[in-house]
Image (cartoon, rainbow, N blue to C red):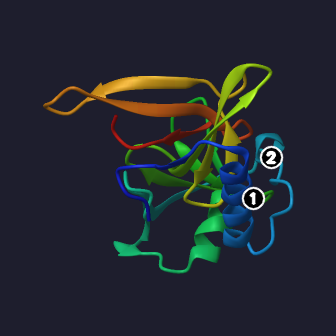
Amino acid sequence: MAGDTLKATTDAAGLAALISRASAQTSGGKASLPPVERWEPPFCGDLDMEIRADGTWFYMGTPIGREPLVRLFSTVLRKDEDGKTYLVTPVEKVGIRVEDAHFVAVEMSVTEEAGESVLTFRTNVGDVVEAGPEQKLRFEIVGENHELKPYLLGARSAGGACLAGGHV
């Protein structure tokens, strides 16, 4: 679903276009996220579902090709204190595997606000997330060439999910 590089924009028009693409990706915008952090249903086992490092979702070894279905699943993701990721509804909780990060940045915009640079990202599931005090950037050194890989922590604060971008 996502490549190793981000498409970057550097002005207000680029940011508006990023938000417009996210809105189009989510069929005109999506309602607020369900309150998965408040739901405590019983654990019902693990599903053979995985989010790969490139952002592609798999079910029983087969890519999920329907983007609206992936977006729906993404709204009920939660990473619990045990470090595992679950799909959570009010009546059940099922485990899934995540190879790297829950979401992948596919586009980035750099704008200026009050003399400070602001980084805004669009994810592979159509969310628009701004880096800042609530969503902090962190970098990990990965691979044989010791490349930096950025992560945006708390991109979905309710689910404690993180977002991975391409290598820098």
Q: Position of residue 70 (x, y in %)?
A: 58, 69
Residue at image mark 2: 39
Q: Camera-side residue: 80 or 104?
A: 104
Kind of element beneath mark 1: loop
Evaluate whether residue 66 shows in this view. Answer: yes
Mark closest to the chain's N terminus, 1 or 2: 2
Judged left or right of residue 96, residue 28 is: right
The disc placed on residue 158 is none
Judged left or right of residue 130, residue 9 is: left
Question: Where, by quadrant of the figure, is residue 17 drawn?
Answer: bottom right
Question: Where, by quadrant of the figure, is residue 124 drawn?
Answer: bottom right
Distance from the alpha carbon under mark 1 to that under mark 2: 7 Å
The N terminus lies in quadrant = bottom left
Q: Where is residue 99 in the image (x, y as percent from the top left)?
A: 37, 48
Is residue 50 positioned above or below 147 on the image? below
Q: How many marks?
A: 2
Kind of element beneath mark 2: loop
Is residue 110 positioned above or below 71 on the image? above
Q: Given contact means CB atoms under 8 Å apart, are the residues at marks 1 and 2 in contact?
A: yes
Query: In percent of the image, x 47 and y 44: which residue is there?
Result: 101
Query: In percent of the image, x 45 and y 49: which residue is there?
Result: 6
Q: Position of residue 49 (x, y in %)?
A: 45, 63
Is residue 145 positioned above or below 71 on the image? above
Q: Which amino acid type corresponds to the residue marked 1 in the rendered image? A: Thr
Q: Which amino acid type corresponds to the residue marked 2 in the rendered image? A: Trp
The C terminus lies in quadrant = top left
Residue at image mark 1: 89
Residue furthest to the right in view is 31
Question: Where, by quadrant of the figure, is residue 75 drawn?
Answer: bottom right
